[in-house]
Amino acid sequence: MKKDLLALTVGALGASAFWVGASCRATAPAQVSTIVRPPPPPAIEPLAQPSPPEAPPSTYLEVAPGALDPFYASLDHAEEKDAGARTDLLFFGDSHTAGDQLTGYLRHELQEKYGDAGRGFVLAGHPPIRYYTQRDITCASTGRWSAELGGKRHATEPFGMAGVRAHSDDKSAVAWVEPCATCQVDRFDIYYLKTAASGALGWRIDDGAWQSLPTQMSAPVVATAGSGAGTPGLPPGGMEAATFPIPVPVGHHKISMRPSGGGPVELFGVAMEKSDPGVIVDSLGVVGRRLSHLYHWDWTVIGPQLTARDPALVVLQYGTNEADDPDLELDTLAKQYDEVIARVRQYAPRASILILGPPDMGRREAGKSCDHMPAQPPLADGTPAPTPVECQWLTPPVLAQIVDVQRQAARRNGVAFFDSFGAMGGADLMDGFFHQEPALAYSDRVHFTDRGYERWGQLLLNELLAGYADWKERNPAARSR
């Protein structure tokens, strides 16, 4: 497993990728991978190292006045079991959220405490993102599908809010998804794209009869900036993001989709929800991506999808891949945070916004050449020779600068910021996390084990819920029903 996670540093798949009979975990053809809800994680003992600073800050969650109030008010409605109460936490991010260990932990804990409103948004069929190991779902696809993955060379827009657009005109191709065996839904929402040349989308619930959904635009769109009228790879005439709700009797169900003729179908994903008061956590991370990708993608498609999700909290979880970007310009990054925050506010005006800073990461100055250096003889007193500085796993200096850009962007825009780097102990810790028993990090010194992600999730959740408790004390009138 460590070997698999090490490959995450290489990057993600992308652009046009074809698959036949593949599964959620990109295993052998014709296999289906099921990811079920894990049991509650065991309590995690305090780390033996490093020692906490002499004067630790009281909190690593910085909140501008009122910045998290909409989220807290929504969570309060869910806790009080108000009819229709729905608290969706939507995470844009990189591999730290693509794997769903961090977001899956938060989903489990919040739903246990405040109610389960459904699994939320997932990609349909076999997703073209390596390590898209979402919990609590089963998914697969057959036939010939193609997928566009944002950030890969030659991929064509639009990618949608989860960074992917799957398309096919093969009538034998089927993509399906269902929640875990013990998970219930009472509505599926299909997120798809309308174009002038789109055909009919066939869908069915469980083993029921196939239904048909026309996905062709009713009228061409006049070419304007951002309309998608000239998008490479798509027919002329514009495009429009759309959502199709399918109510079902409450219970466990599976949705299947296929092209039904008249042209290709373009799918972004499916949301699985319940009408019960509670929490949803949408994990939209894409391996290897940076905030700049989200900034450059087509928000005439992402924006309406975000509006349809109606999140209570939008989280921007980036920073790790920025630290590996040799062309990173901090001033540009700061401006992109300002713009993305403005777009989120435009399309999700009721949502709170949280910038989730990156955790520590380790890098060796001499890189892989360190693996081939001859062992050094012990010192005269018999102690092992110290590792040369160029082969020590140290935090890249730019990471602290990225964290500062995020913190200042949060302050400048009046949103919340969580300092994951500081909360987890600070610099130069990933090698120790890897060697700890049981390990908290993998050998790439970038990604965490499940235990490490649970620790990160605990630190974030503890501070969010402490702020929620404080909000309830300060707002008794708002809580009177």
Image (cartoon, helix red, strand yellow):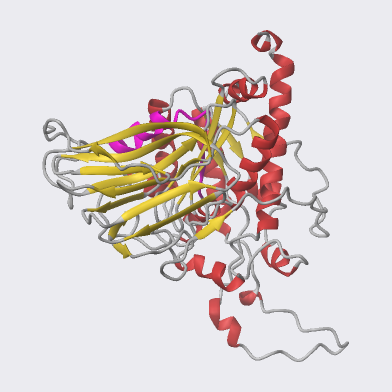
| Picture layout, residue 130 above or below residue 339 | below
Q: Is residue 313 magenta?
A: yes
Name which residue lies at 26% across and 46% down: 266
Front position in the image: 198 or 397: 198
Q: Residue furthest right?
A: 381
Residue 396 % position (x, y): 57, 61
Q: Nearer the viewer, residue 180 or 323?
A: 180
Which stretch appears magenta?
299-318
| Residue 307 pos. (x, y %) | 39, 29
Question: In the displayed structure, would residue 385 be above or below residue 309?
Answer: below
Q: Residue at x 56, y 67 (%)?
A: 5
- Please state if 160 lies on the left or on the right of 393 as rendered: left
Dividing the picture into quarters, in which one does residue 99 lie? bottom right
Q: Nearer the viewer, residue 279 or 351?
A: 279
- Say above or below: 393 vs 357: below
Q: Is residue 376 left or right of residue 344?
A: right
Q: How many marks?
A: 0
Residue 149 visible? The answer is no
Q: Quadrant of residue 1?
A: bottom right
Q: Quadrant of the C terminus?
A: top right
Q: Is residue 303 at all visible to an observer of this figure? A: yes
